[in-house]
Image: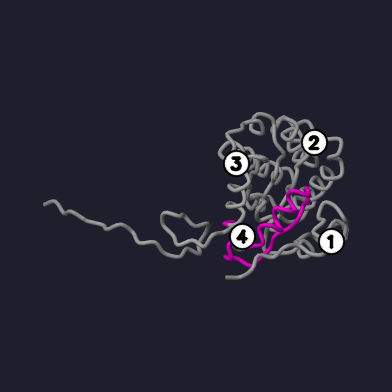
């Protein structure tokens, strides 16, 4: 006996378990969830800044929408990466940096159809080591790119200890040197926390406080940006 099961088209619903799919979920325009002119001004001014908000408030959805928007404008290349997987490395900085570089390479391929990072990141990691590899790869990619690069780094505060400090230091070094050495036009770090609340080992706390208080690369006017609640 053959049983035929008929399913009607699924009705759309509100999704809180991750970034929405326009075909399946009701969606508020993510670009209207924050002050887009302010964000675009910070990016045009080549600022490195932070976006933070509690869980399931739409941070990732907003970042993905911003990435699409910037790429559609055609003046910049923008890539979104999620570095949460690097959290599993805990204090193994080399593995954490490796995971972030691999994530960057994958996103460059899928978002921009650019395999430059894929072809070069392992060589830079081998030659420069994890304490410089992320910065060296971003610098080489920016030199290769025909347009300014904007990096949206999600779940940055999921990183801990040496992996977190290394990423921040490499971004800071690239920011300081970018008048002479190509580096990212703008960087957005996104997570649950402001940078002063990032989780590091006690011996690293002084270093993080110094980075947070420095004018660069986290020059976010007086505070970082916070995404509003629904």
What range is drawn magenta here? 34-61
Q: CA distance from mark 1 to mark 4?
A: 26 Å
Which residue is denoted by mark 4 in the rendering? Answer: 59
Q: Secondary structure at mark 1?
A: helix
Q: Nearer the viewer, mark 1 or mark 3?
A: 3
Name the foreground residue: 104 vs 177: 177
Pointer 2 or 3: first along the chain = 3
Residue 225's x, y, as percent? 72, 63
Q: Is there a contact, CB below 8 Å, between mark 1 and mark 4?
A: no
Q: Quadrant of the C terminus?
A: bottom right
Which residue is denoted by mark 3 in the rendering? Answer: 107
Name the foreground residue: 151 vs 205: 151
- In the image, residue 2 above or below residue 132: below
- In the image, residue 69 above or below residue 119: below
- Asked where in the image residue 109 lies, by quadrant, the reply is top right
Pointer 1 or 3: first along the chain = 3
Q: CA distance from mark 2 to mark 3?
A: 20 Å
Pointer 1 or 4: first along the chain = 4
Q: Is residue 215 magenta?
A: no
Q: CA distance from mark 2 to mark 1?
A: 30 Å
Name the foreground residue: 51 vs 127: 51
Which residue is denoted by mark 1 in the rendering? Answer: 205
Pointer 4 or 2: first along the chain = 4
Crowd around label 3: few <14 · some 14–19 · many ≥20 (10 Å): many
Which residue is denoted by mark 2 in the rendering? Answer: 182
Q: Is residue 38 magenta?
A: yes
Q: Nearer the viewer, mark 2 or mark 3?
A: 2
Residue 20's x, y, as percent? 49, 57
Residue extending farthest to the bottom is 230
- 78 lies left or right of 46: left
């Amino acid at each position: 006996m053959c049983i035929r099961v008929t399913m009607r088209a699924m009705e759309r619903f509100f999704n809180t378990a991750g970034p929405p799919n326009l075909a399946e979920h009701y969606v508020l325009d993510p670009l209207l969830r924050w002050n887009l002119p302010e964000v675009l001004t910070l990016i045009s001014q080549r600022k490195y800044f932070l976006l933070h908000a509690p869980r399931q408030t739409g941070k990732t959805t907003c970042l993905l929408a911003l990435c699409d928007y910037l790429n559609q404008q055609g003046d910049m290349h923008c890539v979104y990466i999620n570095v949460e997987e690097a959290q599993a490395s805990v204090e193994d900085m080399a593995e954490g940096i490796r995971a972030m570089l691999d994530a960057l390479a994958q996103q460059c391929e899928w978002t921009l159809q650019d395999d430059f990072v894929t072809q070069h990141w392992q060589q830079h990691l081998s030659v420069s080591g994890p304490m410089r590899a992320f910065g060296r790869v971003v610098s080489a990619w920016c030199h290769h790119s025909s347009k300014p690069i904007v990096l949206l780094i999600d779940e940055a505060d999921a990183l801990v200890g040496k992996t977190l400090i290394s990423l921040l230091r490499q971004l800071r070094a690239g920011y300081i040197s970018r008048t002479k050495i190509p580096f990212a036009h703008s960087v957005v770090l996104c997570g649950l926390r402001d940078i002063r609340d990032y989780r590091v080992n006690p011996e690293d706390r002084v270093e993080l406080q110094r980075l947070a208080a420095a004018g660069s690369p986290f020059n976010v006017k007086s505070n970082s940006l916070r995404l509003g609640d629904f």
